[in-house]
């Protein structure tokens, strides 16, 4: 019984760490993706402006 109660918190902490890593990685990826989209839109609008201007 003592052995299981010692292992349980460690497993919980490990699971929490992994979850936090996944969330952090996803947030960074999402931010990178949003920046990429923003850059694409900027490029698109600059091309549209050039085409619209005489």
Image (tube, helix red, strand yellow):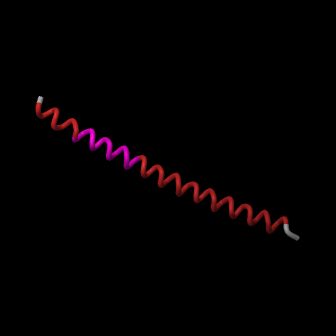
Q: Is residue 18 left or right of residue 50?
A: left
Instruction: Indicate the quadrant where residue 13 lies.
Output: top left
Residue at figure coordinates x 58%, y 59% from the top left = 35
Residue 39 located left or right of residue 15 = right
- The residue lying at 53 percent from left, 57 percent from top is 32
Magenta segment = 10-22
In depth, the one of 37 and 2 nearer the eye is 2
Between residue 16 and residue 26, name the one nearer to us.
16
Outermost residue toward the right? 54
Please name the predominant secondary structure of the magenta segment in the image.
helix
Name the outermost residue toward the top.
1
Looking at the image, residue 36 sits to the left or right of residue 26; the answer is right
Q: Residue at x 53, y 55 (%)?
A: 31
- Number of numbered discs visible in the structure rendering: 0
The answer to whether 2 is drawn above or below residue 42 in the figure is above
Q: Residue 34: image x %, image y %? A: 58, 55
Quadrant that contains the N terminus: top left
Q: Percent x, y for residue 6?
A: 15, 37
Query: From this viewpoint, which residue is outermost toward the left?
Result: 2
Q: Position of residue 47 (x, y in %)?
A: 75, 65
Q: Is 54 above or below relative to 36?
A: below
Q: Residue at x 59, y 59 (%)?
A: 36
Residue 44 at x, y percent in the picture:
72, 61
Whether the magenta-drawn stretch holds residue 19 is answered as yes
Does 33 sit left or right of 53 as displayed? left
Q: Is residue 53 magenta?
A: no
| Image quadrant where one finds the C terminus | bottom right
């Amino acid at each position: 019984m003592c052995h299981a109660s010692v292992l349980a918190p460690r497993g919980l902490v490990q699971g929490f760490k992994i979850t936090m890593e996944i969330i952090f990685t996803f947030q960074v990826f999402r931010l990178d993706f949003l920046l990429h989209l923003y850059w694409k839109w900027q490029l698109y609008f600059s091309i549209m402006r050039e085409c619209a201007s005489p």
